[in-house]
Amino acid sequence: MLTLSVVATKGGVGKTTLCANIGGLLADMGYRVLLIDADIQPALTRHFQLSHVAEHGLTTMLQRGALADDCISHVSLPPETFRGDISVLNVRGGFLHLVRSDTQTWDEERGVFKYDSALQDWLANRLDRLVRIRMAIKNDAVSAKYDVVIIDTQGAVGHLQDAAVNAADMLLIPAKPDIVSAREFISGSLLLIDRHESAGNMGYSVPPMKAVINHYQNTVDSRTITTLIREQFIELRGKVTVMDTMVPAIAAFPKASTAQVPVHWIDPGKAGDIMHRLMWELIPSLEGKFTPNHKGDLTVLSRAVATHEPDTDLATEV
């Protein structure tokens, strides 16, 4: 079982969109995927339509230190409202399950969501707060049920983000190609490295870190900032590798979010190509494998063999 945490120290860089679309692509390939919304602002929880809403969610999972069925909601793919051709969608036995974020409650009087700090306060008083997510998912019972776990995190340093990093086999860091976001990406990544290298004194290590340029636009400014980000390898102590695949700012992504489906369902051409390339770079053993609705003609390396059969185990990727 492969565990991927998507992290950033700044909000609005596209963490949730990446989590949802990577999860959706893998499920369409036939993999059993668990999404964990470990963000106090539960965007991933609201991203998809749910066919089953579990009684509990993130708080109960962390406090128990174990994942049980009463914390696992089921994503409806396709949702009842989807009007596209579903004849080749979600036909390989893959699925998306979700551990909902439950740190916000609806304030009826004010008509707004309010943040409940109880989970963060509870974690703050736990000496084992760094391992609470790892305890819940890194065991034979969860590994037998899922091929991939994808964890969405809060856009700020904190106990939940620390636990998500420590549970991961790999970290994915979105970076937007504008100067403010680029500076935050560099300083935030250094903070992340420093924070978790210090945990090495307790026997922990920082997982491999990959950065992806997200919301890329074909403009002079965007190209300049992208080059700046790619040139920070030494400053980031060689810990962060910037991926070749870039995710552009195209209309298919917000359309997919509105429709509550993976983006490659909305646009199996350009967006589908992008998501396949991103997936192949993240998980090289998948190179040459496609979702059933893929429309592009992507060149793959000669070592890859095109197939539609999912691997039995992705944990050997890292």
Image (cartoon, rainbow, N blue to C red):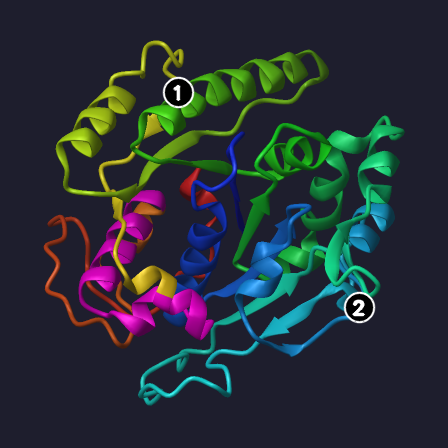
Against 278, residue 69 (above or below) is: below
Answer left or right for 291 relative to 115: left
Element type at marker 1?
Answer: helix
Identify the residue at horizontal 19%, vertical 59% (top origin): 305
Q: Label 2: which residue? A: 70
Residue 298, x across and y down, in percent:
13, 58
In this view, the residue farthest toward the front is 110
Q: What range of the chain is rendered magenta? A: 255-282
Asked which quadrant contains residue 44, the reply is bottom right
The three-letter code of the residue at mark 2 reads Asp
Against 149, residue 174 (above or below) is: above
For the question of whether residue 107 can be seen, the reply is yes
Checking the image for residue 183, the label placed there is: 1
Give the CA distance from mark 2 to mark 1: 41 Å
Total marks shown come to 2
For the question of whether residue 30 can be seen, the reply is no
Identify the residue at horizontal 66%, vertical 30% (top origin): 162
Majority secondary structure in the magenta region: helix
Identify the residue at horizontal 47%, vertical 42% (top origin): 12
The three-letter code of the residue at mark 1 reads Arg
Q: Residues at badges 2 and 1 in contact (C-beta under 8 Å)?
A: no
Badge nearest the viewer, 2 or 1: 1
Answer left or right for 211 relative to 295: right
Nearest the viewer among 72 and 104 is 104
Checking the image for residue 192, the label placed there is: none
Against 67, residue 165 (above or below) is: above
Is 275 contained in the magenta span? yes
Asked which quadrant contains residue 87, the reply is bottom left
Mark 2 or 1, nearer chain start: 2
